[in-house]
Image (cartoon, coloured by chain):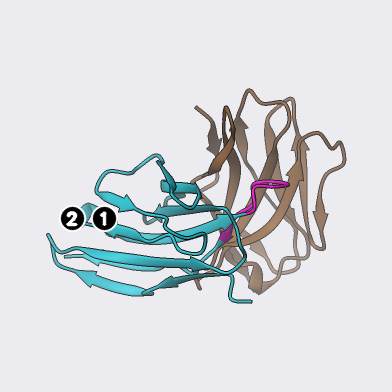
Chain colours: A cyan, B brown
Amino acid sequence: NAGVTQTPKFRILKIGQSMTLQCTQDMNHNYMYWYRQDPGMGLKLIYYSVGAGITDKGEVPNGYNVSRSTTEDFPLRLELAAPSQTSVYFCASSTHEEDEKLFFGSGTQLSVL
Amino acid sequence: AQTVTQSQPEMSVQEAETVTLSCTYDTSESDYYLFWYKQPPSRQMILVIRQEAYKQQNATENRFSVNFQKAAKSFSLKISDSQLGDAAMYFCAYPMYSGGGADGLTFGKGTHLIIQP
């Protein structure tokens, strides 16, 4: 059982470039999330989705876009990369049935130079 | 807004000793869950323990236990018989409840736990 899979694990971008961080889960979870973790800080929610075709903004959505065409996939798009987007990005999912615990991917280290 | 506060940026403990990590939170909910996650140098986020607010008994998972004080909105993590593998960042987390349920977890800033051999 793979759980939550994120690709790539590392990426370096130049200012103004764009890229998509991929996230897929094989647990049939309806809820999926994107977080960013800046050095020495906790995780902040960027976007979340409660099911295919439904997405909503979290605390720090500016500069990002998401889509959810299937239950399994929840990609995060950076359109015009900025140095402030240098961070570790985590995708997570949950069943949202009993409690709210999250299952995390292994993260993507992104540097924008 | 729901907030989670971890007041100890860093803690150090001798191997085999006991250490307690603090967490306080703010909420107007009466029934909820609380979580502690561990993040070792591998970066993976690992669920350590969870607590249901309506349960009087503190949760325990092997060497990990919590001291949950609902009235004080306090949720500390106790690690007994500390091991070198316990060295990590520890995050306290609380659900972001809205009208229809929770929309993810909100995390504290974390406590960096150092284990001295």
Which residues lie in the magenta part?
Answer: A95-103
> In the image, is residue A14 above or below residue A82?
below
Can residue B6 be seen here? The reply is no
Circles 2 and 1: CB atoms closer than 8 Å: yes
Residue A79 on the magenta span:
no
Q: CA distance from mark 2 to mark 1?
A: 6 Å
Which subunit holds the residue at mark 2?
A: A
Residue at image location 48% in from the left, 53% down from the top? A52
Q: Secondary structure at mark 1?
A: helix
Residue at image location 60% in from the left, 58% down from the top? A29
Can residue A22 be seen here? The reply is yes
Residue at image location 78% in from the left, 60% down from the top? B80
For this view, does B63 lie left or right of residue A53? Answer: right
Q: Position of residue B72 (x, y in %)?
A: 70, 27
Which subunit holds the residue at mark 1?
A: A
Q: Nearer the viewer, residue A103 or B64?
A: A103
Q: Nearer the viewer, residue A62 or B109?
A: A62
Q: Nearer the viewer, residue B100 or A70?
A: A70
Q: Position of residue B109 (x, y in %)?
A: 48, 47
For this view, does A44 lie left or right of residue A77? Answer: right
> In the image, is residue A40 above or below residue B106?
below
Q: Secondary structure at mark 2?
A: loop
Residue A96 on the magenta span:
yes
Q: Amino acid at mark 2?
A: Ala
State the mark number for residue A82. 2
Q: Position of residue A36 (x, y in %)?
A: 39, 54
> In the image, is residue B98 above or below residue B10?
above
